[in-house]
């Protein structure tokens, strides 16, 4: 294509050029996360969020992300020990999710203290992209609305583990439970979205190849066969 001014970003593009954005380096992002003992997590939504067609329910939704089936874009929240993971004041859209890292600085598409304005197009999570600074990262966590969650949109991510917090609730498709005295002809056997809780042992069995992280008494921990083990954040996000 001929060189010219892109009407979307006011940058010169042409030939094989694409609009470029200023983003913090990976080391800067990881340093921010370390200061707050925070993790970038794509949660299995409870309930499923905007754009969901219920094609992937737990654990298939997380397995798809782990299998790199969502490299084009996925919605995440940055969370830290002490956050709430259930109820109206939750700081995330779920309790169980995949911990993600950056392959390079362009892995971070957008960051917002509440909503990036992300949307799903052809199965890919997208968001309006812009320049990001270290201050934007800080604001996305420290300026979250009270009793709400932030949003980071990630693409071309790497997998660092699984995060799970009480009450370990997930959305699944299940046939409704009916009263024993209800006639069979009134019982619809079509599965519908519902909530259920899984125990840590089930999580270990479901994701045996991945470290399982959680938050306990305001600290970041690892869940293992030996129980709760203290976790050094630096072992998760290794600063290049």
Image (spheres, rainbow, N blue to C red):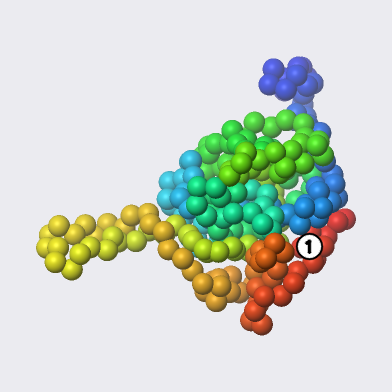
The residue at the point 82 percent across, 62 percent down is 234
Q: So how many labels did they put on this image?
A: 1
Q: Is residue 100 visible?
A: no
In the image, is residue 62 above or below residue 2?
A: below
Name the residue tied to disc 1. 233
Q: Place residue 158 in its image quadrant.
A: bottom right
In the image, is residue 127 above or below residue 215?
A: above
**Extreme residue toward the bottom, this view:** 226
Front residue of 211/61: it is 211
**Picture coordinates of residue 221 (x, y %)?**
70, 68
In the image, is residue 4 above or below residue 232?
A: above
Q: Is residue 215 visible?
A: yes
In the image, is residue 115 above or below residue 5?
A: below
The residue at the point 69 percent across, 58 percent down is 81
**Picture coordinates of residue 215 (x, y %)?**
66, 64
Specify the quadrant that holds the C terminus: bottom right
The residue at the point 73 percent across, 30 percent down is 130
In the image, taking residue 100 as reference, residue 36 lies left or right, namely right
Specify the quadrant that holds the N terminus: top right
**Extreme residue toward the right, this view:** 240
Front residue of 140/118: it is 140
The residue at the point 52 percent across, 55 percent down is 86
**Picture coordinates of residue 124 (x, y %)?**
56, 42
Q: Place residue 109 in its image quadrant.
A: top right
Front residue of 44/56: it is 44
**Picture coordinates of residue 160 (x, y %)?**
71, 62
Q: Residues within 10 Å of mark 1 (few under 14, many from 20)?
A: some
Q: Place residue 139 in its image quadrant.
A: top right
Secondary element at tag 1: helix
């Amino acid at each position: 294509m001929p060189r010219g001014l892109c009407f979307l970003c006011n940058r010169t593009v042409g030939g094989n050029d694409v609009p470029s954005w200023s983003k913090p380096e990976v080391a800067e992002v990881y340093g921010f996360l370390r200061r707050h003992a925070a993790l970038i997590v794509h949660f299995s939504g409870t309930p499923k969020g905007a754009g969901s067609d219920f094609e992937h329910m737990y654990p298939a939704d997380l397995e798809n992300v782990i299998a790199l089936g969502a490299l084009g874009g996925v919605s995440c929240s940055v969370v830290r020990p002490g956050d709430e993971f259930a109820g109206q004041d939750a700081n995330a859209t779920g309790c169980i999710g995949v911990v993600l890292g950056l392959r390079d600085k362009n892995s971070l598409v957008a960051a917002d203290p509440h909503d990036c304005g992300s949307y799903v197009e052809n199965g890919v999570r997208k968001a309006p992209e812009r320049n990001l600074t270290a201050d934007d990262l800080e604001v996305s966590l420290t300026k979250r609305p009270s009793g709400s969650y932030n949003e980071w949109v990630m693409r071309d991510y790497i997998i660092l583990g699984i995060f799970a917090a009480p009450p370990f609730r997930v959305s699944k498709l299940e046939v409704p439970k009916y009263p024993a005295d209800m006639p069979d002809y009134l019982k619809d056997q079509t599965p519908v979205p519902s909530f259920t809780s899984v125990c840590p042992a089930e999580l270990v069995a479901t994701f045996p190849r991945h470290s399982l992280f959680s938050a306990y008494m305001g600290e970041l921990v690892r869940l293992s066969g030996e129980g709760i083990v203290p976790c050094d954040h630096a072992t998760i996000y290794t600063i290049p």
